[in-house]
Image: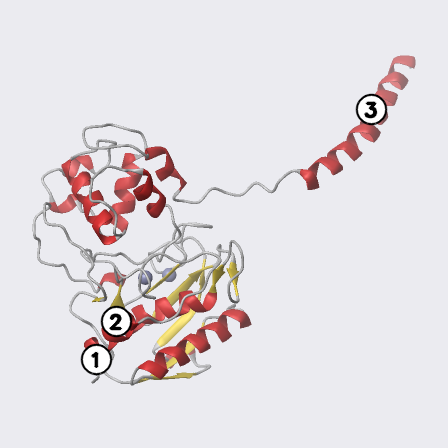
Amino acid sequence: MAVKNVNLCVCIFLFLVALPLYSQANPSKPKAEKPSPFEFIKHLEGCHKGEKVEGLQQLKAYLEKFGYLNYNHSQNQNHANDDDFDDLLEAAVKTYQLNYHLKATGTLDAKTVSQMMKPRCGNADIINGTNWMRGGKKRPDHGHNALHTVSHYSFFQGNPKWPSNQLTYAFLPGTNSNAQSAVARAFDKWAAQTHFTFSRSQNLGSVNLKIGFGRLEHGDGVPFDGRGGTVAHAAAPTDGRFHYDADESWSMGAEPNAIDYETVALHEIGHLLGLDHSSVREAIMYSEVPVGATKGLHGDDIQGIKALYNIA
Ligand SMILES: [Zn+2]
Ligand SMILES: [Zn+2]
């Protein structure tokens, strides 16, 4: 009996002492930020051809996703799923470096790694595949040594565009009012520079453009990746889908560590209208998405849309 009482006392004592410690410990603990989906690239700094380093397989998948690498078109198919830094990977890194105004060394130097880790649009920079974002057609194969680079503005494969200049849009259920007003302002800015008019409708079933949020796999076969990494994507004409990644930290205007709704809307509307990524850093169609800053339409974007639609 006495032993039992002692045990009970110890238990109560532990409970009383431990509880406040525990509850104090929690708020002071820094909130564990989930690492960006692109965090793995950091560890690859300094890698070059001929090396075998864990994580290169993930880098191959990254470069394939953004259009820089396609092992299916090469005789090296078996290297798609290993950590070998081969010729094909080196060529892809060089093309990436050219597109982002970096020295085309083919080595994963610090500047290249830093650029690759930045949050970006989920659409590819180079269109060579067959998913719904890429128009479903393949570009002529120039062989794996050819450097495909983005020169200022660009269009999707086959230059798809809208036959009408009066487009309608609607928001998917669950789209918050901040995003809705930012998207509306972005449409106004594109309308002011082009022959397009954009009118909002409540009827999702009959509109040209459908805008909303998605998280991870969200039904279009192009999954998002949690916080960081890819932050939004949109399809070429005349598909009309534009999705924000619901896992990002979004803001109205420039806020530290957050991404501005309107800046991203301007970029994704560019895709909806038929523009692909531009290599002009200041252009809204540059693939990198600014964090804690805003951006507007640039001359390169306007020139691009005017060229696509033959507007004088
Ligand atoms: Zn984009
Ligand atoms: Zn989507």
Q: Amino acid at mark 2?
A: Gly
Nearer the N terminus, badge 2 or badge 3? 3
Quarter of the image where one finds residue 7 = top right
Q: Amino acid at mark 1?
A: Tyr
Q: Nearer the viewer, mark 1 or mark 3?
A: 1
Mark 3 and mark 1 in contact (Cβ < 8 Å)?
A: no
Most extreme residue toward the right is 2
Mark 3 and mark 2 in contact (Cβ < 8 Å)?
A: no
Q: Secondary structure at mark 2?
A: loop
Q: Quadrant of the C terminus?
A: bottom left
Image spot of residue 303 (x, y percent):
24, 74
Q: Secondary structure at mark 1?
A: helix
Nearer the N terminus, badge 2 or badge 1? 2
Task: Find disc 1 in the rendering and name its residue.
Answer: 309
The Cα–Cα distance between marks 2 and 3, rounded to whole angstroms, is 68 Å
Q: Residues within 10 Å of mark 3 (few under 14, many from 20)?
A: few
Task: Find disc 3 in the rendering and name its residue.
Answer: 11
